Image: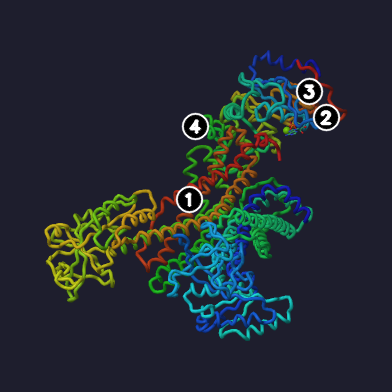
Amino acid sequence: MTTAMQAAPSQRFVEHGDPVAIQAVDLVKDYGKGDSTVHALRHVNVAFEKGRFTAIMGPSGSGKSTLMHTLSGLDSVTSGHIMFQGVDLTTLNDKQLTMLRRHDIGFIFQSFNLLPMFTAKQNILMPLTLAGKKPDVQWFDQLVRTLGLSDRLSHHPNELSGGQQQRVAIARALITKPELVFADEPTGALDSASSAEVLSFLRSSVKELGQTIVMVTHDPVAASYADRAIVFADGQIVADVNAPTAAQMSDLLMQERERAARGPVPPVPPQA
Amino acid sequence: MWSITMQMMKKNVRMLIPAGIAVLIGTAFIAATLLFSNALDASMTETQTVLYGDANYAVTPAQNAPDSVYENTVGDFHIDRLEAVDGVECARPNVEGPITYSSQDRHASGVVIATSRDAKLLPVSIVEGRAPKPDEPDTFALPQRLASQWNLKVGGTMVVNSSANTDEAHPEGFAATIVGLTDDPHNAYGFYGGASVASDGLLARLSGTASFDKMSATQLYLSIDTANATTLGDAKATIIGDLPQGFRLLSRQQAADEAIKKMSSDGTDVTKQFLLAFGVLALVVAALVIANTFQVLVAQRRKTLALLRTIGATKRQLYISVLEEAAILGFVASALGVAAGIGLIAAVGASGVLASASMQIKIIIDWQVVIVPIVFGVLVTVLASLGAARSATSVTPLEAMRPLELTDQRKMKVGRAVIGLFILLMGMGLVGFSLWMQKDHGDSALLAAVGGCMFSFLGLALTAIFWMPWLMKGAGALVSLCGPSAKLADANIQKNPRRIAATGTALLIGVTLVSTIATGAASAKATMNQALDERYSVDVVVQGGNVPQQAADKAAKVKGVQHSLYVPTALATYETPDGKTMDTLVVGVPSIQTLQDVMNIDLGSVDMAPGHALMPQYDAYDGKRLTFADGRVALTEQVVDTNAEEGRMRDGNHADLAVTQRDFRRVTQTTPVVAFVNESKFADGTFQDSGHMLLLKLGGANVPLSQTFDDLTKVFEAYPNVQLGGPVAERQQWETMVNAMLMLLVALLAVAVIVAVIGVANTLSLSVIERTRESATLRAIGMTRGQLRTSLAIEAVLISVVSSVVGMVVGTLFGWLGINMVMSSIATVVYPVDWRTYGIILAIAIVCALVASVFPSRRAAKTPPVEALAEA
Ligand SMILES: Nc1ncnc2c1ncn2[C@@H]1O[C@H](COP(=O)(O)OP(=O)(O)O)[C@@H](O)[C@H]1O
Ligand SMILES: [Mg+2]
């Protein structure tokens, strides 16, 4: 690991003075017990700043999804802490976590996960429906307009294309104006044109609406839309890049794959 | 393919459990019914031959024997000659008589039977001492229980007598020697608390017959040695040759079989078929549960099936595979059902709940008990899975490449709608026809009505897929205003109209039947009540002699007496417009209100001023209408003529009164007519009270009518001439009967309802399994566990309430129709709406729905939201 890479996050952090949206401290997640234990996260320390678009990359099985699930309170951790809004998420119960997801965290899934029995509009408003809250009409209109969904609102998911479905899912994730949005391979099921559309929107929602987005992706091109990219391998962060480009990320991923082919990763280096 | 079927089945075994339970319940019920009727048969065979003792042959009247056989006497059997036949061991005529025992001022009565040379032919057993010998003078064996109560010992003597004793030399009875004690292990004389066995002479004297040979006997039991076939044949031939005219020889088995056959045709078989019908009903409901399960299974396996098709499986193989799976499920569930049925009957037998009915439950397993339920179970399961099998064949190999979409988007079949609608209309037409026909052709109208109901219901069930989701949409739209959980529940119901319709139909069947029966019973009760109110206008009438004031006051205070009216009566006559003289009882009442209080019919406004009389519309004896010229009646009092011979009456005072007529009946049995007049007519001497009567209205207090009636009987015990009468007892008997029938039917229908509730649980769990991803997504975007659970509970309640309400409406209409058919010729039919029962049904439906949603919703709530993100 290069010093440049290690210095990068803290440097940017200081430079911009962006407050931290969510932070993982010494996060460990093991699956299974005994010999068959899988160390999905090995003492991960990372912070995501507010108002930025961060991509998490890495080979399949490296722990990207696990990191996202634990950060969002969907999954428990083996040890470590997650600081969000001044609270350690690992100490909250199911109800508190649910409320957190309802109000402060948004999700975008690879396979959209829209509810087939509801219309696009009902799907978008679902988090508010669950909370029993009235939608902010202006915000709703703005989202729908920006996402180009105005004439699709009364359609059911099976009447929408993949790109449209994902845009509905994005609107659903943003309708509560969450503090933080997690997206797990949001373009994984889309063709390149739809991908570009979705990614542009994600970026503009960060730039123009001030959202904070953490996105897991396989695709170096997708990562290039982000302000920052973290590369994961075998449950650890192996690289942290600012303003990534597609070529740069391709190289990094290639290196990781080669290293994985050579043998297991050396013991955990101490994080800065 | 077989191994693939097994593999797929293994993977989804959890989903098959509710369907399996549904089949299990149905088949267990059928197995239990068959076992029960076997036990019933056995117990009857036993009762039939219980008098045989150890005899293996019996001489009984032939089936078409002349009446002369009933004049047959013991002597006519020539027992000596029969016993002398080679191979015949001994014989005993079935003769019994009354007996009363007396010992130191204690008396008891019972039955005494003839003895035999060999005690093994006795239907009772000798537990101490010996059996009396036929030719001994005055010996007997008495029931052990009596002996121990009265402390009597073998060897002692005792005076026995009977009501039939005609021996003028011994009117006080006969001193007889106790030679043994009897017990009645087979309950042959349970009704009498056992039986005594007496020597021939004593039995004849107790029966008031000159000699034992002269006693009448139509049955003779024989013990014949069966070891040697030739001697047996010879013996039988000899006996048959020596039998009196009209008698025949039967083996014990033959006699039992014959008795059972006779009884079956008028009893057990009907019971068996009646019970089996409920088992079949439960299986029909189970079929709906099975059909749902297999539809979902096939839907879930579409990808696997498509894959199999791409690699070369034929449509036929997929079709067979589904049917195989159904057959396996049906077989396993039915086999378990048979075991459960056997266990159930064994448990009932062991618990001895039927001991009070003096019935022993013997487990008799014949091939039918095992085979019939299994055949039914497998057949129903396979038939129910046909639809799913067909949809398995419609899976195209291409689907293997496409993403999975589980929602049932197939178009509803127009053909089904047309056929369903046609049947429905035909059913309703038949119902209309039956109503139109009813006046002239009661029987065929009833048949048409039953057919009409069946067709209507079938039509409703077939078209359920159209109207039920529509109704649920309406109900759902209402509840979805209640919050996000309800909204989600509504949306989920709408997503799967086919499955919801099948689930709802299962419940609909159960609820419709329950409400039909409840309505029928309530309607029958109300109709009968009204008829009884008309026919018996007063609950209890105390009359005869002069009912004393003191007793009347006491009676008024008996618990359960609501109102009482103690009134003076007199006898009078009047002339009818056509010149006949009518006897009437004149009753003086203080006011119309006090009379109304004890009357069951509404008298309306009646003038009871001194110049008026209230009289019935019909003659209580011949039912003819009573008419009065100008609405007036001229009563002539009848008083006892003290100068003439005893009992003669003479005319007394006259009264000319204005008559109001009302339809009250049976106030008194002594005269055809009653006239209620103002009591001032007695006070001013127009009528002299020749007696008093007491009219009572029961109710109000929370005591059973029977007890009130008993208490009243006690009050009047001391007055021998006073008669206590009224329709209360009759009415109560009727009500008890209807209630018991209702309870029984509802209990039997409960089997079908339980299966339907399992169906609701099944549908929910299938949906929950299917919706794992949706549930997880909802959890991820902020739905709480509680909301998810609530949503499923609302879904269940919606399905069950909508189906139940429809079931209750349809059932009520059927019930009304039925009662109209059966009762309208007897009485004015009443169409009650039994809100209480409806409330109970609805409450049960809701509770069941909530219970049904417990497991599925627990499962749904346990789904970790992470699963929403995991890719399939
Ligand atoms: N529920 C689970 N049970 C056991 N192991 C799991 C589970 N989820 C993930 N893993 C393992 O944890 C590691 C990280 O998985 P994941 O975070 O999904 O990787 P990525 O998203 O980077 O492909 C993998 O080795 C995976 O096999
Ligand atoms: Mg992943």
Disc 1: which residue = B841
**Marks 3 and 4: in contact by CB < 8 Å?**
no
- Looking at the rendered structure, which numbered label has been put on residue A238? 3
Disc 2: which residue = A257
Can you say which quadrant of the picture contains the C terminus of chain A?
Answer: top right
Dot 1 falls on which chain?
B
Dot 3 falls on which chain?
A
Q: Type of residue at label 4?
A: Lys
C-alpha separation, residue under disc 1 versus residue under disc 2: 67 Å
Q: Type of residue at label 3?
A: Val
Place of residue B815 in the rendered image (x, y in percent of width and height, measured from the top left): 44, 60
Q: Type of residue at label 2?
A: Arg
The lab-note entry on whether marks 3 and 1 share a chain reads no
- Residue name at image x 56 percent, y 63 percent: B277
Q: Type of residue at label 1?
A: Ile
Dot 4 falls on which chain?
A
Circle 1 or circle 2, nearest the eye: 1
- Residue name at image x 73 percent, y 29 percent: A64
C-alpha separation, residue under disc 2 versus residue under disc 4: 49 Å
* Along the viewing direction, whichever of A114 and B801 lies nearer the viewer: B801
